[in-house]
Image: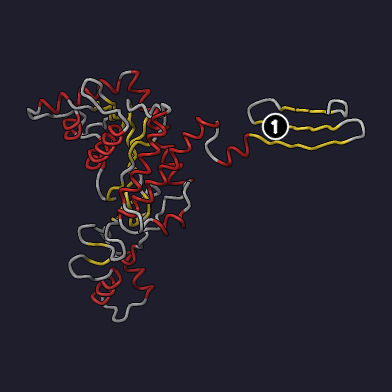
Amino acid sequence: MPDHSWLSKTRSRLPHEVHEQVFGFVLTLLAERGLVKGERLGVDDSTMEANAALRTIVRRDSGETYRQMLEKMAKASGIATPTTEDLIRLQRRRKDKTLSNADWTSPTDPDARIAKMKDGSTHLAYKPEHAVDLDTGAIVAAPIHAADQGDTTTIAPTLAAAEKALSALGLALRPEDRCEVVADKGYHSRAVLKAIDGGPWQTRIAEPKPPKGYLRWHGDEEARSAVYANRARLKSEVGREAMRLRGEIVERSFAHTLERGGMRRTWLRGRDNVHKRYLIHVAGYNLGLLMRVLCGVGTPRELAALTTVTGFVVRTDDAFVLVIAAAMLDAAPALLVLAVTPDAA
């Protein structure tokens, strides 16, 4: 993955369009070698912690900090000069401890939003969303959304970014050759299915169970048709296989970029800067797919583990002997002995 310190120094000097061109250039290299099919896209999102702390948030209307709010509540409860321990106890006992993004903001990173992370903790965060080619594993689009936006809200701009990337690769979507969109039940809604149905996309979105055990349509035949068609595609063998691929390949892209790639927490501020950094990071992930095609390995560590070569020379009065021993990961060890006699030389 790209080095953080180098990108942090250069990201302010390079515009966002340059990072998009680099990301598109890597996608072009993948497409030239058949690593972008554009037939089935898996869509999913995750969270990344912003470079801002919750303790620094202020109210949007008055600019009051969170600590000042607690001190005011402590004085109202009879504590004239509350200590830090008093404020902590008050915070723990306080009911309805929800923080609304409509009321609170971060002065250091106004684009960050209060959100619950994947591990259950609450932080100021961003929401990266991937559109991944399920046939190859290539990330076609990776926009950064506000962390408080729901999946049904962000899927439309993510698909628009994916469609733009595919068109730039000569894989423009046509209604007669519909590309499948595979997603989990968080993306399922009648509005989403109606908006996508009939266009260049064909949905295979997991359907949650109705809260009352049945659905009411209230005369909305368009929504009824879209939901039933999506359900039929899900129950087919092709649909079940696509959902298995989504769980494997899309989640793997987040594991490599966020967990092993170190992007679970960003060290930049502002959604534009975070997205520039993330585009280069995802381009590095896509380059790993290309390297596996070109040389069989995608990372330097994998290359080091693949082959171990040892060579030494034995020189005597009668011959010059070169010995090369190679131990390969998935193949039998190889031994090469080259002997040169004085007469042959």
Instruction: Give how far across and how far down residue 263 sits, in percent.
Output: 42, 50
Q: Can you name the residue that lies furthest to the left here?
A: 219
Q: Can you name the residue that lies furthest to the bottom here?
A: 80
What count of labels does the image hold? 1
Looking at the rendering, which quadrant does residue 222 occupy?
Answer: top left
**Category of crowding for the residue at label 1, using alpha-carbon neighbours closer than 10 angstroms: few (below 14), some (14–19), many (at least 20):** some
Instruction: Give how far across and how far down residue 47 sits, in percent.
Output: 35, 48
* In this picture, residue 316 sits left or right of residue 284: right
* In this picture, residue 176 sits left or right of residue 309: left
Decide which of 33, 229 is in the foreground and name it: 33
| 269 is higher (above) or lower (below) than 136 | below
Decide which of 103, 165 is in the foreground and name it: 165
Looking at the rendering, which quadrant does residue 205 occupy?
Answer: top left
Report the amino acid beneath label 1. Answer: Ala
* In this picture, residue 129 sits left or right of residue 137: left
Instruction: Give how far across and how far down residue 209 sits, in percent.
Output: 25, 31
| 29 is higher (above) or lower (below) than 143 | above
Looking at the rendering, which quadrant does residue 95 occupy?
Answer: bottom left
Instruction: Give how far across and how far down residue 106 sits, in percent.
Output: 28, 63
- Residue drawn at x 74%, y 32% is 325
- Residue drawn at x 16%, y 35% is 191
Decide which of 81, 323 is in the foreground and name it: 323
Decide which of 180, 166 is in the foreground and name it: 166
Q: Quadrant of the C terminus?
A: top right
Which residue is tagged 1?
327
